[in-house]
Image: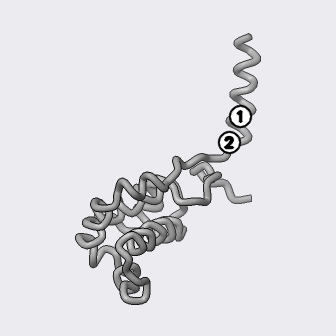
Amino acid sequence: MNINSRPRLKTRQFSTLHIEILEQLLVSGKSNRDLNQSFGYTKRSHCVVDHSRKVMHKLLALEKLSREDNKDRVIYPRTYKFWWKGLLDRHRQALLKNAIAPAYYEDACTSKFENEQKLLCM
């Protein structure tokens, strides 16, 4: 059984977490492994890459640009970080309007502990 320190996301849709990950990828200068670790994913996880690409594809759609013509900008976002940051700043409100707040599954141990605490307090 694989136990992670990060709670599992309930929301598989586009969330504000995706936007935050792309922004950290562009601004922080950290490697993917460091970002994975700071967001609670395993070092070899592809979550940071997958989540940031989802936002990049949405930004391309908002700009009415094709994926084929901008494939290199999606593959190497740090090389084009100023271009991506400009698009992100320009379309932030539209992205936030479509994004949902991330929701997590409750940890079975945590919820059991909380229920016991509620019973003791009564």
Mark 1 residue type: Ser
Up-down relation of residue 115 to residue 88 (above or below): above
Mark 1 → mark 2, Cα distance in angstroms: 7 Å
Hey, which residue is sitting farthest front in the picture? Answer: 64
Which residue is depicted at the point 42% across and 89% down?
Answer: 68
Image position of 9 (left or right of 55): right
Q: Nearer the viewer, residue 121 or 9?
A: 9
Q: Can you identify the residue that label 2 sits on?
A: 106
Mark 2 residue type: Glu
Hey, which residue is sitting farthest bottom in the picture? Answer: 68
Q: Can you identify the residue that label 1 sits on?
A: 111
Helix, strand or loop at mark 2: loop
Residue 83 percent location from the top left of the image: 25, 73
Which residue is depicted at the point 37% across and 88% down?
Answer: 69
- Does any portion of residue 44 appear in the rendered image? no
Q: Nearer the viewer, residue 100 or 29?
A: 100
Image position of 111 (left or right of 71): right
* Label 2 Cα crowd, 10 Å radius (few <14 / some 14-19 / many 20+): few
Which residue is depicted at the point 74% across and 10% down?
Answer: 122
- Does any portion of residue 5 appear in the rendered image? yes
Helix, strand or loop at mark 1: helix
Residue 91 percent location from the top left of the image: 33, 61
Label located before the other in sequence (1 or 2): 2
Residue 23 percent location from the top left of the image: 35, 60
Up-down relation of residue 97 to residue 49 (above or below): above
Q: Are marks 1 and 2 in contact (CB under 8 Å)?
A: yes
Q: Nearer the viewer, residue 58 or 39?
A: 58
